[in-house]
Image (cartoon, rainbow, N blue to C red):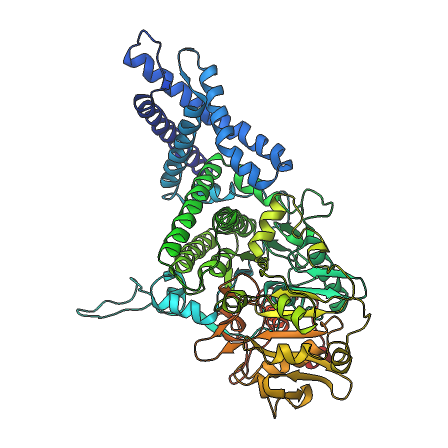
């Protein structure tokens, strides 16, 4: 054992010397290239003196990076995360200037802007060198991965030998999109798990032909509720109930508030309601970690979780603690910052190319969007993946993480676009990294990958008809309509993460939704699902009441070519679905007579009936047109890839699970609704670890 410790010490010392030597050489090369960076006096020095100066400077810079950088990042947790990202280069350059000042020769110097460049290059080179050397040494590799997170358990109980479970949510990736990406070779890690990738370990005969790995996972589609968006799906998956979540945003008459799933205060309230309804803390209540999600799932460890973004929290659960775990390594900070800039530039180039080619459909992608996309596809991904790696190496029992990169890009570029495919390839590499870390974790891990919804392509309602849903509602009510339709802001999840990181409110209050007078309707959009509420009426209005107040409204909406169907309460039938040409089907007869729901899928009737039973369902629920031939819908928001209602791929996400776990459903059974997915995941946790979460009684199972 003592000999092993000595060998590890010698190996670590050797790697440190190698990194120091490479850093010294890098500094010498940069001093020869950059005019404002020198390592010698103006009169010139010997090569030996210059080499010693570079070696001392590189060594001091390395020590400062190791000792001072983590302290600076911890202090700067008070600064919004995106601001911290912009300060990365300045802080790293300042450390280099300090290292040059501490150099005994006193002759080295650099201009401030040059110091930023030198520090960035040296950090990247040192990181690459250290990583390359550590790959050959499993112990060193494990220690390096540990440093990506500050959540290593200290003095806790020994890690159990039973398997842990990692749930990775690929936000917005539909079942068909995943299958297409695997078929194109964009996601080789998932292809290998499904037995569709090459395997060098298989017996290669004299002419083996195409060889494939043995499958380790199964792919299962599931169906969302009517509200096919992250708020409803993730709340149901993590907390077992998404009751009374009719959309991404909706108006509640009793509190006179607009609930928005990606607003921290709303997320916290929805989580509270779900816990109260189920009587259980959530899927992750036993030694779990929640990373990058809207909701905590009852986890002990929460980072980058929206539902805790606005309340006071201790060091262990603060929502932004995950940033420290990642940015405490200056090489990570520099690499992510450089990738952030590159991704923003890539988006500007791609959007410019789409505009010049006059591609259709297309939405505006200017303003701050390039930086929002870069945050979602680079910063959020890197930080969340690093947090998951740290949780695995700490031996946590269950981890649930959300990667929003694809969803954000698909909203603006389209779910089947080349831009979105590039993001899928990078997400697959993140899964490969998580799989690699699992090999070094103190316990075995089972990796489950799933999505919360898909996305359906199509033009925006505004682009096709020149008016918004709000304009159409006002026209049906006989109210004046603005000459120019205003854009409806997107409800993409990544924008919520950015605003939380900047400590800005996710929505600028309810005023943006409030009409000028209480008698005017409130019209809200959730993808291709629209909600119309009359705030001056304290109850959910019936069809008869709406017709008496605005005789033309319902017929105007139902007969518009961009509208698929309406749901309203009826005094005679309880609830009715309205469609074009006077179609009016009671909700309890939709199975026998689907009427306007024809073409929306076999589960549409049950999804509509369930939403009709919610206390806060809007006075009028509006679902856009849907073309079953190509899956097109018309978004009421500014999105060409949308989700939130019924129609197309948005309602068909996937569940990718290890074969070591029981099948999600029995043969012939469908996996329908986020609450059903929650019950499956709970069962898998029990299979892996025993009774981690409160077991349901047989009666509760039958009721579910």
Quarter of the figure with residue 118: top left
Q: Can residue 10 be seen in this view?
A: no
Residue 648: percent from left, percent from top = 50, 75
The answer to whether residue 535 is left or right of residue 434 is: right
Residue 210: percent from left, percent from top = 25, 70
Identify the residue at the far top of this view: 43
Identify the residue at the far left of this view: 206
In the foreground, 418 or 461: 461
Quarter of the figure with residue 111: top left
Indicate whether 664 appears above or below 414. Answer: below
The C terminus lies in quadrant: bottom right
In the foreground, 92 or 659: 92
Q: Can residue 587 be seen in this view?
A: yes
Residue 321: percent from left, percent from top = 62, 43
Please report the residue visible at 64 percent of the width from the left and 56 percent of the height from the top.
287
The answer to whether residue 197 is left or right of residue 316 is: left
Indicate whether 124 appears above or below 509. Answer: above
Please report the residue visible at 65 percent of the width from the left and 71 percent of the height from the top.
475
In the foreground, 109 or 667: 109
Residue 379: percent from left, percent from top = 51, 46
Indicate whether 544 appears above or below 247. Answer: below
| Picture mark count | 0
The answer to whether residue 329 is left or right of residue 596 is: left
């Amino acid at each position: 054992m003592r000999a092993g410790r000595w060998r590890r010490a010698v190996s670590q010392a050797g790697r440190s010397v190698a990194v120091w030597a490479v850093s010294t050489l890098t500094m010498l090369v940069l001093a020869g290239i950059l005019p404002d960076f020198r390592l010698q006096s103006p009169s010139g020095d010997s090569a030996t003196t210059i080499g010693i100066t570079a070696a001392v400077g590189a060594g001091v810079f390395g020590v400062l990076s190791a000792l001072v950088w983590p302290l600076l990042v911890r202090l700067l947790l008070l600064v919004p995360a995106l601001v911290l990202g912009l300060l990365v280069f300045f802080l790293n350059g300042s450390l280099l200037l300090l290292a040059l000042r501490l150099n005994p020769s006193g002759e080295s110097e650099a201009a401030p802007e040059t110091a930023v460049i030198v520090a960035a290059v040296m950090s990247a080179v040192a990181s690459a060198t250290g990583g390359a050397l550590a790959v050959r040494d499993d112990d060193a590799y494990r220690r390096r991965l540990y440093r990506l997170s500050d959540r290593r358990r200290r003095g806790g109980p020994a890690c159990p030998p039973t398997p842990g479970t990692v749930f990775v949510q690929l936000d917005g990736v539909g079942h068909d999109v995943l299958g297409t990406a695997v078929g194109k070779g964009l996601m080789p890690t998932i292809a290998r798990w499904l037995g569709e990738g090459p395997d060098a370990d298989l017996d290669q005969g004299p002419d083996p032909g195409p060889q494939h790995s043995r499958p380790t996972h199964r792919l299962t589609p599931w169906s969302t509720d009517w509200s096919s968006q992250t708020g409803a799906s993730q709340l149901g998956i993590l907390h077992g109930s998404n009751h009374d979540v009719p959309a991404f945003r909706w108006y509640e008459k009793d509190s006179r508030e607009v609930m928005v799933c990606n607003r921290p205060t709303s997320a916290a309230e929805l989580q509270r309601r779900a816990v109260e309804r189920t009587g259980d803390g959530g899927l992750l209540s036993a030694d779990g970690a929640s990373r990058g999600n809207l909701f905590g799932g009852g986890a002990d460890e929460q980072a980058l979780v929206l539902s805790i973004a606005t309340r006071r929290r201790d060091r262990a659960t603060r929502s932004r603690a995950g940033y420290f775990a990642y940015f405490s390594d200056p090489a990570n900070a520099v690499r992510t910052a450089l990738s952030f800039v590159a991704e923003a530039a890539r988006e500007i180039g791609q959007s410019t190319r789409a505009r010049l080619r006059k591609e259709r459909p297309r939405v505006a992608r200017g303003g701050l969007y390039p930086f929002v996309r870069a945050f979602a596809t680079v910063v959020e991904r890197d930080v969340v993946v690093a947090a998951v790696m740290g949780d695995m190496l700490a031996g946590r029992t269950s981890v649930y993480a959300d990667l929003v990169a694809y969803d954000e890009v698909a909203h603006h570029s389209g779910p089947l676009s080349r831009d979105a495919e590039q993001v899928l390839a990078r997400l697959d590499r993140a899964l490969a990294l998580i799989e690699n870390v699992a090999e070094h974790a103190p316990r075995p891990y089972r990796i489950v990958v799933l999505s919360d919804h898909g996305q359906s392509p199509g033009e925006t309602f505004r682009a096709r008809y020149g008016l918004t849903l709000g304009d159409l509602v006002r026209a049906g009510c006989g109210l004046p309509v603005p000459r120019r339709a205003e854009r409806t802001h997107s409800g993409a999840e990544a924008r919520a993460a950015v605003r939380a990181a900047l400590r800005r409110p996710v929505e600028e209050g309810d005023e943006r939704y409030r009409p000028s007078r209480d008698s005017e309707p409130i019209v809200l959009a959730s993808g291709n699902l629209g909600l119309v509420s009359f705030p001056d009426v304290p109850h959910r209005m019936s069809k008869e009441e709406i017709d008496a107040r605005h005789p033309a409204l319902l017929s105007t909406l139902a007969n518009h070519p961009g509208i698929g169907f309406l749901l309203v309460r009826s005094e005679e039938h309880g609830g009715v679905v309205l469609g074009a040409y006077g179609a009016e089907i009671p909700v309890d007869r939709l199975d026998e007579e689907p009427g306007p729901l024809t073409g929306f899928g076999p589960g549409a009737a049950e999804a509509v009936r369930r939403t009709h039973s919610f206390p806060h369902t809007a006075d009028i629920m509006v679902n856009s047109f849907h073309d079953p031939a190509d899956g097109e819908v018309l978004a009421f928001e500014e999105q060409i890839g949308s989700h939130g209602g019924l129609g197309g791929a948005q309602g068909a996400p996937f569940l990718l699970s290890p074969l070591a776990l029981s099948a999600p459903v029995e043969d012939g059974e469908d996996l329908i609704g986020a609450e059903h997915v929650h019950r499956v995941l709970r069962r898998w946790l029990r299979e892996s670890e025993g009774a981690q979460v409160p077991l349901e009684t047989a009666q509760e199972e039958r009721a579910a």
